[in-house]
Image (tube, rainbow, N blue to C red):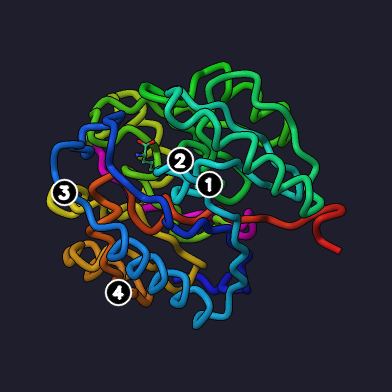
Amino acid sequence: MTTDAGSRRYLMCRPTYFAVNYRINPWMDPTAPWDTALAVAQWETLRQTYVDLGHTVEEIEPLPGLPDMVFAANGATVVDGTALAVQFRDPERADEAPAYRAWLEHAGYDVQEAKFVNEGEGDLLLAGDVILAGTGFRTTHAAHARAQEIFGRPVITLQLVDPRFYHLDTALCVLAGSDGAGPASIAYLPEAFSPGSRAVLRRLFPDAVTASAADAAVLGLNAVSDGRTVVLPVQAKGLAAALEERGYRTIGVDMSELRKAGGGPKCCTLELRPGGRADS
Ligand code: ARG
């Protein structure tokens, strides 16, 4: 267990206009019912959980017609006060990018253009000194190279192979070091990665927690850790037990409604890492 549980700053977007009316990942079924009020209630519990842990939660105004805007992790990647803007793969989400960009500029972050398909912290996860970067479904190799150039940190490309785990943050969670401080530790689902990427993860993180297929199937890895407490889907019982055994405290939250769009706690949460102007 590590102790980097300093106060974090998160950006979230209330799911006022949440819906599942298109399908851009296998979790989404536009013919099945969804409940926006329940999504809002689950999101509010998540937000309050962060506040109770002592973290700061900023909010961006949701926009009508953008049902996935609740997934703030896809709004940018923010490291050392610099924000790399996003460019969505799917036209359904395209208009979220300028909204997040404007929020970050207004908040004082140095915002850099995306240039390539890049879905933010969905695929780019800071883990200590390095950025773990998913590709295969959304974020492109070119975006990985751009992230390395913008942030000046080594970017480790990881190949995702299972369409259910279409963003890196559905298959891998940074347990310690998501703020860039101290040694990193992670939990992940090996089967979600190509053989070569599995070998890379084993080499870099020999002590990683490996999740079961059952935990991943409830999006258990879509979790948010401050280095001490891990907020994860309440249905991920096995993963929670494994994390407790490692000395982490866990808090289960029910995100069942947002899962219908393919999201969990981490998808709803963009970490704003300070530095430069935005820090003052
Ligand atoms: N429906 C959204 C999409 O497919 C869900 C995004 C979830 N976000 C995440 N960071 N994994 O784009």
Q: Residue at x 26, y 67 (%)?
A: 254
Q: Amino acid at mark 3?
A: Pro
What SS does tag 4 mark? helix
Q: Which mark is residue 33?
A: 3
Q: Which residue is mark 2?
A: 66
Q: Residue at x 26, y 51 (%)?
A: 259
C-beta proximity under 8 Å, tags 2 and 1: yes
Q: Which residue is mark 4?
A: 244
Q: Which is more N-terminal, label 2 or label 4?
A: 2
Eyeballing the image, is 212 above or below 102? below
**In the displayed structure image, the side of residue 34 where residue 77 appears, left or right:** right
Tell me which image quadrant ligand 1 sits in: top left
What SS does tag 3 mark? loop
Eyeballing the image, is 137 above or below 69? above
Establish whether ligand 1 lies closer than 8 Å to the Cβ of label 1: no
Task: Tell whether position 184 is magenta.
Answer: yes
Instruction: Give the CA separation, mark 1 to mark 4.
Output: 38 Å
Circle 1 Cα neighbour tier, 10 Å, few/some/many (<14 / 14–19 / ≥20): some
What SS does tag 1 mark? loop
Eyeballing the image, is 198 above or below 253? above
Q: Residue at x 49, y 56 (%)?
A: 269
User: Is the N terminus in the top left, top right, bottom left or bottom right quadrant?
Assistant: bottom left
Residue 31 percent coordinates (x, y) = 14, 37
Q: Which residue is mark 1?
A: 63
Q: Amino acid at mark 4?
A: Glu
What SS does tag 2 mark? loop
Q: Which is more N-terminal, label 1 or label 3?
A: 3
Q: Amino acid at mark 1?
A: Leu
First to last magenta residue range: 179-190
